[in-house]
Image (cartoon, rainbow, N blue to C red):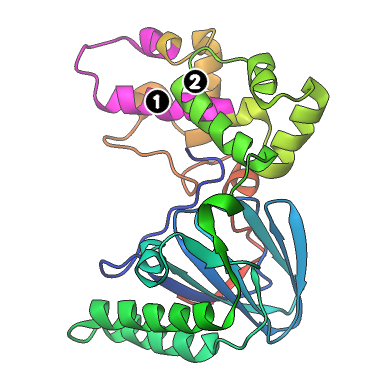
């Protein structure tokens, strides 16, 4: 699912990424990794599962795997980020997480951040093992100092969890699901559902559905073993007319279906007309080091 699922490429095998942003501003999204924030300069607002937190210089913050969030920094703010495989936490305290995302105890994230960046940059022998050890030690210190909660109990049946379930429903039934059916699935009125979906996803329901349908159409075009026509593929993926399909296809990829490059993959970077609604990190953000 593309709309608010962030996928990063990593150096090494341990799914660890570290970077510093000036004026970080991204749209609501989630990812499979856990995320640690350290505010190096000025102020940053974080919305986590629809709860807003105001962070200042020196604050540290934990975002769990699959938590929906967005970050909005002040113009001159600098935010350090470490993203890592959530399975590391299961080795420390299976089934538990920090009770509060705001980390009250100083976990020395800056020191670990710098060391992880050095390992990623130079990739000396055993750097993967060294990085995993650094993450483990850092999170161990956090778990020692912070109150913990049961991971399962922390994830109740809220609108956010229902929203994630809805995205699975859309993925499975993308060729025929309707706006009304999606609103009913969430148990919300149509006007409220419309506002909720756009607020959390950063795009409308119809925009999201078009992307999911187009993703499936591109996969069929790339692996057309049954020699289906473009019209057949459009119909199978839920587009009512070939004209509509062609318009959406070019709008989101910059190509017509027949011009599509071999093995093309639809990603947030490849979407042409919806970058600001689709790519989690907005252009105003500046990556200082990667």
**Nearer the N terminus, badge 1 or badge 2?**
2
Q: Residue 225: say if magenta.
A: yes
Label 2, secondary structure: give it: loop
Main SS of residues in magenta: helix
Q: In the image shown, does 78 or 136 lie closer to the viewer? A: 136
The residue tagged 2 is 174
The residue drawn where x is 35% and y is 65% is 15
Instruction: Please say if 54 is above or below 213.
Output: below
The residue drawn where x is 49% and y is 57% is 65
Q: In the image shown, does 49 or 210 lie closer to the viewer? A: 49
Whole-percent x and y of residue 267? Answer: 44, 44
- In the figure, is residue 81 to the left or right of 77? left
Q: Is mark 1 in CB contact (under 8 Å) with mark 2?
A: yes
- Measured in 3D between alpha carbons, the distance from the residue under mark 1 to the one under mark 2, in whole angstroms, is 9 Å
Graded by Cα atoms within 10 Å as few (under 14), some (14 to 19) or many (20 or more), the crowding at tag 2 reads: many
Whole-percent x and y of residue 234? Answer: 43, 13
The residue tagged 1 is 216
Whole-percent x and y of residue 123? Answer: 25, 82
The residue drawn where x is 31% and y is 23% is 221
The residue drawn where x is 68% and y is 18% is 184
Determine if residue 202 is in view. no
Graded by Cα atoms within 10 Å as few (under 14), some (14 to 19) or many (20 or more), the crowding at tag 1 reads: many
- Residues rendered magenta in the picture: 209-234
Q: Residue 148: say if magenta.
A: no
- In the figure, is residue 75 to the left or right of 275? right
């Amino acid at each position: 699912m593309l709309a608010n699922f962030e996928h990063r490429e990593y150096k090494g095998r341990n799914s660890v990424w570290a970077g510093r942003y000036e004026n970080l501003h991204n749209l609501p999204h989630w990812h499979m990794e856990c995320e640690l924030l350290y505010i190096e300069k000025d102020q940053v607002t974080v919305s986590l599962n629809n709860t807003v937190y105001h962070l200042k210089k020196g604050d540290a913050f934990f975002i769990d795997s699959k938590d929906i969030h967005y970050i909005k920094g002040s113009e001159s703010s600098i935010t350090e980020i470490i993203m890592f495989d959530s399975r590391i936490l299961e080795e420390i305290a299976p089934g538990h997480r920090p009770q509060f995302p705001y980390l009250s105890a100083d976990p020395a994230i800056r020191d670990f951040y710098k060391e992880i960046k050095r390992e990623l940059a130079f990739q000396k022998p055993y750097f993967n093992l060294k990085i995993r050890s650094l993450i483990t030690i850092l999170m161990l210190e956090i778990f020692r100092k912070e109150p913990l909660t049961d991971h399962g109990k922390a994830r109740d049946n809220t609108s956010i969890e229902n929203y994630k379930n809805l995205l699975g429903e859309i993925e499975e039934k993308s060729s025929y699901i309707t706006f009304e059916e999606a609103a009913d699935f969430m148990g919300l009125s149509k006007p409220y559902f419309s506002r909720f979906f756009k607020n959390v996803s950063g795009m409308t329901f119809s925009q999201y559905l078009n992307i999911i349908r187009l993703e499936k159409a591109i996969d069929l075009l790339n692996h057309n073993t049954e020699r289906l026509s473009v019209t057949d593929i459009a119909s199978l993926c839920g587009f009512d007319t070939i004209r509509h399909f062609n318009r959406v296809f070019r709008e989101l990829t910059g190509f017509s279906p027949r011009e599509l490059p071999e093995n093309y993959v639809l990603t947030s970077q490849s979407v042409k007309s919806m970058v600001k609604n689709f790519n989690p990190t907005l252009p105003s953000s500046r990556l200082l080091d990667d």
